[in-house]
Image (cartoon, coloured by chain):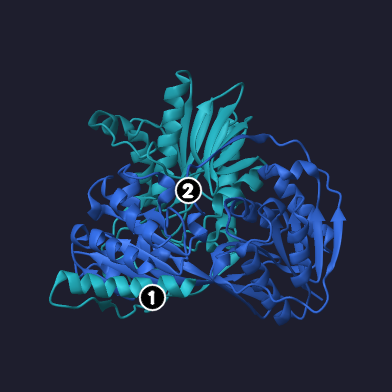
Amino acid sequence: MKLLVCLKQILDPDVPARDFQIDPAVKAARRGGANLVTNIFCENAVETALQFREAAGGDVKITALCYGESSAEDCLRKAMAMTVDEACLVERDGNTNPDAAAVGRVLAAAIRRLEQDGGPFDAVLVGRESGDWGVGQTGGLLAEELGRPALGFVESLQPGNGGVTLRRQTDVGIEVAEAEPPFLVTITNNEDNVPRIPKTRDVMMSYRKPLQKLSLADLELDSEEIRAGSSIFEVEEIFIPTDEVECELAEGDTLEERVDQLAKRIHEVVASIG
Amino acid sequence: MANVAVCVLGSLGYDRAAQGAAGAGRALAESVGGELHALVIGPAADDAVAALAAVADRVVVGANESLRDYQPEQALQAAQQLHAAGGGDYVAVLLSNDTYSQEIAPRLAHRLGGSSMADAAAIRVDGDHLLAQRTAYGGKAISIYRLKKQPAVVWLRARGFEPAPEQGAPGDVTSADLTLDPPRIRITGREVAAQEGVRLEDAPVIVSGGRGLGGPEPFQELKKLADAIGAEQGASRAACDAGWVPPNWQVGQTGKKVAPELYIAIAISGASQHLLGMGDSKVVAAINTDADAPIFKHCSFGIVEDYKQVVPLLTEKLQAMAG
């Protein structure tokens, strides 16, 4: 079987709020001193794919694909250090507009190109949403571009009866599904797909693994619309909210008094709900 | 003339989220001078259809029996066909924020040649386009998007919108006969989470615990507090990742987005990841040892104290007050 995992490189989402700034010229976050990292749900997707390969115990090949700047090579190297077999980077200029439709079209074209050369992918895995814009539309749009069925919020893939068994998280609890390839899933996190730490040896080996580079021109997608990333939506405005509220701290000489005050406030609110 | 559609799942009925989505839809319909239509995926209870007819100008139900059992490919096909059955002339198709609507929305947008957007907290018309507001960068920023193609297919932070008002006369209800292909991904089983009480998203009061609790045992203590005030229990990502409580307790960017009347954050520092999940709460109370914790910038009242000292005493007092 063949699996493909899509990766996105983003600004480290753990940057403290006090260091976070907007660049009004590009209507996006200023990078500042922040690191670039792989989006966490994408790393969960890599881990989920690796666990499928281990469970299948047989011949499963995993490819990582990223549409990003040259710096995103780091994400692909890290995926290969986690023991993904091969990688492909579709190079994008500095534009970081979040238009998921353009991204979906680029990823679909790259997937078709890779499939021409190496055969079809049974499953495409995409992170549920990204830690930067977080719009969470890429997986669904990519499924439509590829014309493949899809399931969202998946936490594991297991070899099933002639297909693949999926487990996913919903409002009502866990759902189990049977999928016949080819299909797409968006991956969410759970306690079992926490990304593994690469072994030193695998980090060294990752530099010997193949990393193919494609341009938008290679994919015949070198249009203004794709490059600008604004086919279905664009950022009109972005700002840092200043709706911090004044917190009233419980006061009093003794703990007893302070907790009593807190209890009264809580009781007040609860009683008002009725 | 252009209309607005609200797309609801028959199996979920006309719940608070659907009411909010319809409310947002009515406001939008008024601003474009069009009608509000309700597109219902799958058979729905009579009272839910009646409630929709009371607020919408037209209701189209895709009543195929097979739609009772949610399958994403079929629900998507149904939504697409209902869109056409309703006239297809929609500036916007609005959905609520249940898991199913979330996964359908972008794919429906693609099939209709429209724009997709997620988790909108506010929407309005601007010229030929819809503008949608939502959080970005894990809650550190607010972004407003211009949706360039019609229809704008948007799933909403639905409970944040006022329910739709009832109209003078109920809207027409019609049934559409849909053609559905067998799904290539089939949901075969559901393990309904052993979560007592209501869904976290619907809970009026939530007591959440975080990393500062240091382990699973203190959640038992928090449960007593929650029981005393009829609250559901939630947790931060740190507490869930550590395996102290089930993952479906998680409130935050990577967990549930909740909007209770009262949210009590205990030993939660208030990382933006978490704030994104509970920022719409009406009243927030915090218990934390660190006076500089970000949570104190996002709460109405709180106490700077070790939860170990506070919670048992607080529970006792609240039990007494509840009488």
Q: Visible in this render: residue B207?
A: yes
Q: Position of residue A131 (x, y in %)?
A: 41, 56
Q: Quadrant of residue B139?
A: bottom left
Q: Chain of mark 2?
A: B
| Rendered location of residue B276, percent (x, y) | 41, 64
Viewer-nearest residue: B6 or B87 = B6
> Which chain identifier belongs to the blue chain?
B
Which secondary structure lies at badge 2?
loop
Residue underneath mark 2: B196
Residue B112 point in image, percent of width and height:
73, 57
Q: Amino acid at mark 2?
A: Glu
The amino acid on which the numbered mark 1 sits, given as a three-letter code, is: Glu
Classed neighbour count for the residue bearing mark 1: other residues with Cα under 10 Å, few (<14), some (14–19), many (≥20): few
Q: Which mark is residue B240?
A: none
Label 1: which residue?
Answer: A268
Residue B77 against residue A247 in the figure, above or below: above
Answer with left or right where residue B275 lies relative to residue B99.
left
Q: Which chain is cyan?
A: A
Where does the N terminus of chain B fall, quadrant-wise?
Answer: bottom right
